[in-house]
Amino acid sequence: MSALPTTLQRQWRRLQRWLDFNRWYVRGSPPWDHGIPAPEVIAFAESHAPGRALDLGCGTGTHAIALAQRGWTVTGVDFAWPALRQAARKARAAGVRITWLWDDVTRLRKVRGHFDLILDIGCFFSLDTADKQRYAQRVRELLAKGGTLLLYVHWRRPPHTFGLLEDELRVFDFLQLTRRTDSVDVVTGKASAWLAYQNGT
């Protein structure tokens, strides 16, 4: 693999990641998709006037559905097709209408308009450096003035390579960090945080 050009290596890693996530949802629910909306998301939804929300890496739709039930107009994006099928079934059972898009969070070719909330629980921190930059550019284009980017991240701690280095958050320097809540992930036991950014421009 080391002999491949960098671009091909990145494409290969992206393909492997896509296959891995699709396998998770074909075999059943991944451990992080436990079907219970995070209190932080519920608190945000209930303390802000409903608007347009974009759930990046929506999985089987737990948070998208919770937002829709509270009056938000929601678009859910994931690149795992089996997850989106489950999400659509859950939304129908819950009696809410949500737009589901099969797309890559670093491209978002199918997403249009501006959003008052962009929610990401676990996507951004798993991307490589180049994809983080592309992701941030799409957030810049899609987040409405006064809108919020709500991120849930795992921190990278040596010797582990999985997670996010704080320096990597500089891609969001065009936004204002308004809240940070550090915690420990209940599934993995890893250091984590909720980060709320606001678009003041």
Image (tube, grey):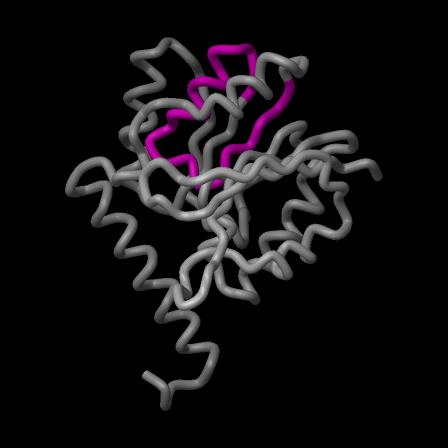
User: Which residues, given as a range, are shown in magenta?
Assistant: 51-73
Q: Is residue 146 left or right of residue 61?
A: right
Which residue is more in the foreground, 158 or 162?
158
Q: At 49% across and 53% down in the image, what residue appears?
A: 155
130 over 67 or under it: above or below: below
Which residue is more in the foreground, 181 or 106?
181
Q: Is residue 55 magenta?
A: yes
Q: Position of residue 58 (x, y in %)?
A: 42, 35
Residue furthest to the right in view is 201
Q: Position of residue 75 (x, y in %)?
A: 51, 29
Which residue is more in the foreground, 115 or 47?
47
Which residue is more in the foreground, 163 or 71?
163
Query: Dividing the image into 4 quarters, which one contains the C terminus?
Result: top right
Q: Is residue 41 magenta?
A: no
Counting every numbered tag in the picture gives 0
Q: At 45% across and 55% down in the image, what residue appears?
A: 126
Q: Position of residue 27 (x, y in %)?
A: 15, 42
43 over 150 or under it: above or below: above
Q: At 55% across and 66% down in the image, what residue appears?
A: 129
Q: Is residue 23 left or right of residue 21?
A: left
Q: At 72% across and 35% down in the image, what residue appears?
A: 178
191 over 115 or under it: above or below: below
